[in-house]
Amino acid sequence: MTTRIDRRMAKLKTEGRPALVTYFMGGDPDYDTSLSIMKALPGAGSDIIELGMPFSDPMADGPAIQAAGLRALKGGQTLVKTLKMASEFRAGDNETPIVLMGYYNPIYIYGVDRFLKDALASGIDGLIVVDLPPEMDEELCIPALKAGINFIRLATPTTDDKRLPKVLQNTSGFVYYVSMTGITGSALADTGKVAAAVTRIKGHTDLPVCVGFGVKTAEQARVIGANADGVVVGTAIVNAVANVLGPKGEKTADPAEAVATLVSGLAQGVRSARLAAAE
Amino acid sequence: MDQPATPNSFRTGPDEQGMFGIFGGRFVAETLMPLILDLERHWNEVKNDPDFRAELTDLSTHYAGRPSKLYFAEGLTKHLGGAKVYFKREDLNHTGSHKINNCLGQILLAKRMGKKRIIAETGAGQHGVASATVAARFGYPCVVYMGATDVARQSPNVFRMKLLGAEVRPVTAGHGTLKDAMNEALRDWVTNVDDTYYLIGTAAGPHPYPELVRDFQSVIGTEARAQILEREGRLPDTIIAAVGGGSNAIGLFHPFLDDKDVRIIGIEAGGRGLDGIEHCASMNAGSPGVLHGNRTYLLQNADGQIMDGHSISAGLDYPGVGPEHSWLRDTGRVEYVPILDDEALEAFKLTTRVEGIIPALESAHAIAHAVQIVPAMDKDQIVIVNLSGRGDKDVHTVASMLGMEI
């Protein structure tokens, strides 16, 4: 069974370039604005969309994504609305893969079976659930795979060779390599070490390996994209939204346009990655 | 929800996956998973190691002052006119609460693991003080995360931590209470994976923390059980302890869990009442969910977002509870009952007056329940209340509740 993620990754492979994976927070700062951001992403050069599900206690996230989640929750975002957003997006774009990213509790409260059914119906292709390591695979990973939704696992610098097979075992779609030990939005790690880690993971799997945490600029996207199959950008996008919000949350410019401008630049970065590497 | 089957013993959990029934587990980011497995490996090595036990017992005796006394609270017993009330005097420990029991155990574990830096979260500051204390004693740098609200209402403890050489980092996220401090400590840990030991203060979090904290705190119940047998020649009828995360309670309860004639009652913070959202009674008014590495009863909304809750007592101001308590609730072995802010305050004043003991506001919740049930009990019955900490830290809070300035 192939998903939109598998197809997109295969296509990019033939094009010989890495994917630009863009994370934004669903419902930040409100539902309509957030949907307009989502709709602007593919045109600006995003290959895969990570749709953030806000959670009150995002333990692996830095201040920028924490604040974005709180803005979204304050704006009335719920998991029901996040799925609705995906479905509205899907009505106009049946190709761009959507990966839901967040924490387990809202899914658990929604009900796993009901969630998977509604996620499929909303055109969701994959899930990244930060607080579900392989030890908890029975909770959501196995049911998701059975339902035909990719379960994308995080591998980290603390995931050594001995543990990697366990992490990769039920992973599908792609592997998300977390470039550093830390929270989202920290400074990018030593790119040489990241490249070595990507090579190490590729020795254990045929799945594409995307790298995230700390990538903020087109230049960084280019460097990371030289040997990764994809580059994930999140905090920089969330910041692009925050930067056009005034002190009371009022919009001082169009957030969708701000995000599109940033993403276009990042897209140029990933598109020149392999060229640069070949030179 | 179906009630779980009654097990042969209530004292065998957790299972190999760190579960107590459906509760507990290891819901953490992959970055932390290898660290938690490493901790579990070391914990399994030391928990039955006689050398480790001997070192801990020596420190508990000569540094912390164990065993803590089991005191017949004659003044309160006379005042209430029912069952005999005993206090397990954890307030007399070094640093003034039960928290030192766990901190001594975990600092020895950190030492065994070769860690170089200690982080901790704290609500009331009791665990922060105990962590700063053992870090000072063993020469470790220590960072304590504390909600900004708690920093303000527990200023004496903040000063104590600083004197002990710890760095106190106020956390402004959320309501600035224990939940937010725990998030921030986890963020520190996920960043500093090589050298840092996360000294969790309550019997919650990812496996093996609920188990190891419980085991270090079970000294409370083990002593109390032996002490009451020696003093009265029989087991108590009822034991009572306050439950925030639940470490003092599980410490008292665990050795009594298979004594089926002993009634066990955990007291949750009822705050300003369970009708609204200003309370921390997760087991009376919450539902199972996943937070801070474990599945347990939580205060949450219909979307699975965690609520902040409220309690007069910073130590009980947490929207979750340790997973073993959730399981004990569902099996029916332990009753969990809410006590309101006002009732705890009355018990605080009463205990101070009739016993000459200023209890922590956390412990005052447990005493308040004794005040409610003891008068209807027979005079030959016995109640043990865990006096988990002393109340010096709370005098500013109490003064402001009473409209006084000090």
Image: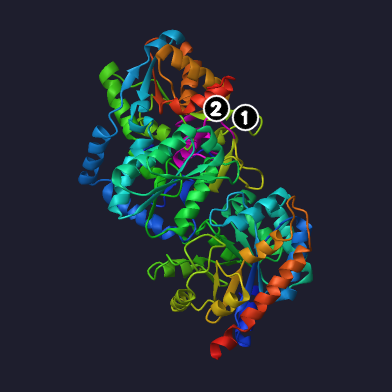
- In-image side of B365 versus A9 (left or right): left
Say which amino acid is labelled 2. Answer: Pro
Q: Residue at x 31, y 27 (%)?
A: B68
SS of the residue at dot 2?
A: strand
Label total for image = 2
Q: Residue at x 70, y 61 (%)?
A: A243
SS of the residue at dot 1?
A: loop
> Percent x, y for residue A255?
75, 63
Q: Which residue is mark 2?
A: B338
Quadrant for the N terminus of chain A, please.
bottom right
Q: Chain of mark 1?
A: B
Q: Chain of mark 2?
A: B
> Percent x, y for residue B135?
34, 45
Say which amino acid is labelled 1. Answer: Leu
Residue B12 forms part of the magenta stretch: no
Q: Nearer the viewer, residue A115 or B175?
A: B175
Q: Residue at x 52, y 56 (%)?
A: A131
Question: In the rendered structure, which segment of residues is drawn in magenta?
Answer: B310-335
* Residue furthest bottom as drawn: A279
Q: Which residue is mark 1?
A: B274
- In-image side of A231 versus B43 (left or right): right
Neighbour tally class for label 2: few under 14, some 14-19, many 20 plus, Cα within 10 Å: many
- In the image, residue A59 sits, relative to residue A197, either above or below, namely above
Q: Nearer the viewer, residue B267 or B198?
A: B198
Residue B132 quadrant: top left
> Percent x, y for residue B399?
54, 22
Residue B325 forms part of the magenta stretch: yes
- In the image, residue A45 sits, relative to residue A236, either above or below, namely below
